[in-house]
Structure formats: C-alpha cells, structure tokens
Image (tube, grey):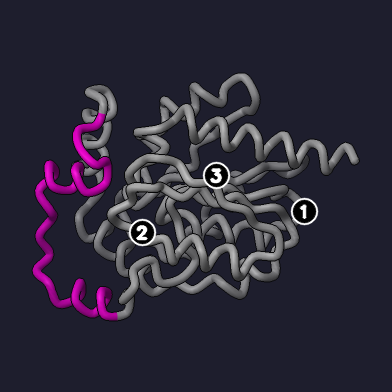
C-alpha cells in the first residue's frame, strides 16, 4: 500500500525481491480526487480476497489505512507490516503542523528538495523517473489534503483491538517520521515488534533487499504460527 502519492509506481525493487515468496499486489489510490482514511478503506475493501488471507504491507501515509482495513476485515488480514509509518501524530507537533499547512500557500515543494528529504539523496535513475512521474500525476491539492489527513489521523484504538502480529520497519535515517511514531505503535499494539533499517524515509526504494528480508522473516513467523 503506497505512501502519499498513492500511485504505487515506486515498488518495483521490493516486489521483485519478494516475488519468490509471495504474490504481491500494489493497491494504488485514485489520483484525481481526495478520499480520507475511512473512505479509502471502503474503496480498497473490495480488492481484499473473498477467501484466503493477506498480509498488508503499508508505507508511510498508508499505515493508518492498513490498520483500518485490518480492523474492519479481521477474517482475511493475517498480519501487518508498517514501514516508516505511524498511527497518530507522525510529527512531534502534528496538530500545529496541520494548522500551519492549512495557512501556507498551495505551492508544491521543488522536486529536488522533496527527493532529498524523502530519499536522502538521489534515487536510482529508474526510480527517479517514476518518482517524478508520480508527483506530476497526482493533483497538488490531493497531496495536500492527504498530508492534512495524515497529520490529524488517530487509529490507536483500532490498532489496540487487532489480534494479529505487526511488524514496524523503522527507517534509521528518516527525516520525516520520527522514532516516536514507531514507539507509539509498539505501545498500542498487542503483538508488535520493530526492526530498524539503515535507510531514509523511502526505505522500500533505497533498501529493498533489507526490507524484503525483514518481511520474509515476518511471513515465516506467521506461517509457523499457523502451522502450530
């Protein structure tokens, strides 16, 4: 489940790294109109399997969305992977940040600055093309309203009610989501563990091998529980 852009264009390296252990489906969102978290959960629900089980893997913005889907559909969601993500207040002063964002002019950040902030430097050339395409595909007002929704979201109650295993992948060099967000996930969830990956916020893009290894281990644990 993709981050703020919602296009799903940035996951080829991770999908490739997981291709031999799981069927991977990237759940993209509508680029033309804004939907809040509950509306996105309702829109994506029909794409969950009617039979069988899934593990939802959610990056950044999508973390609260994955929690909502798991809470609403416990029969088919067997586990969650939340990568560089959050369930409430992604910034130390999220409420203030939302108020500030609402007052700022609706001007997009220069893409080179955004790329450095998210990826810690230059993305690999192929992914940089996808990143630039994604950011130009999604309307700026949609991105802005998604950012506001992320700053205001609170799914701690839904997370606490889940009875499935949860893995939080912490980006060790994340300039966007602070470590407090990961600690909050561990405090609220019944069955959660955390692994830190030496990567910027875009850990799936900049460290796909390490991320895939963590997900593989988590899938093995789920399989062992089911077999037991």
Q: Which residues are magenta?
A: 96-123
**Residue 47 position in % (x across, y down):** 59, 44
In primary-sequence order, the first of circles 2 and 3 is 3
Numbered tag placed on residue 75 in the rendering: 1
In primary-sequence order, the first of circles 3 and 1 is 3
**Residue 73 position in % (x across, y down):** 69, 57
Q: Which residue is mark 3?
A: 57
- The secondary structure type at the circle numbered 2 is loop
**Residue 117 position in % (x across, y down):** 21, 49
Report the front residue among 220 and 14: 220
Residue in the image at 66% along x and 70% along y: 160
Residue in the image at 49% along x and 66% along y: 87
* Main secondary structure of the magenta stretch: helix
Q: CA distance from mark 2 to mark 1?
A: 30 Å
Q: Which residue is mark 2?
A: 177
**Residue 174 is inside the magenta segment:** no
The nearer-to-camera label among 2 and 1 is: 2
- The secondary structure type at the circle numbered 1 is loop
Q: CA distance from mark 2 to mark 3?
A: 17 Å
Is 55 on the left-hand or right-hand side of 85?
right
């Amino acid at each position: 489940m993709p981050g703020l852009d919602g296009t799903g264009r940035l996951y080829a390296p991770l999908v490739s790294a997981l291709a031999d252990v799981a069927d991977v489906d990237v759940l993209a969102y509508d680029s033309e109109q804004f939907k809040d978290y509950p509306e996105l959960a309702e829109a994506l629900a029909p794409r969950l399997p009617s039979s069988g089980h899934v593990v939802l893997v959610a990056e950044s913005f999508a973390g609260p969305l994955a929690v909502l889907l798991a809470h609403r559909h416990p029969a088919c969601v067997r586990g969650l992977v939340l990568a560089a993500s959050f369930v409430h207040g992604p910034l130390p002063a999220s409420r203030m940040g939302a108020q500030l964002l609402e007052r700022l002019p609706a001007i997009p950040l220069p893409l080179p600055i955004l790329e450095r902030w998210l990826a810690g430097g230059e993305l690999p050339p192929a992914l940089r093309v996808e990143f630039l395409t994604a950011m130009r595909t999604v309307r700026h007002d949609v991105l802005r309203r998604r950012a506001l929704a992320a700053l205001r979201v609170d799914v701690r109650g839904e997370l606490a009610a889940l009875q499935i295993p949860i893995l939080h992948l912490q980006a060790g060099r994340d300039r966007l989501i602070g470590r407090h967000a990961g600690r909050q996930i561990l405090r609220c969830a019944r069955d959660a563990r955390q692994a830190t990956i030496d990567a910027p916020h875009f850990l799936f893009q900049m460290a796909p091998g390490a991320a895939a290894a963590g997900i593989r281990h988590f899938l093995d644990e789920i399989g062992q529980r089911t077999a037991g």
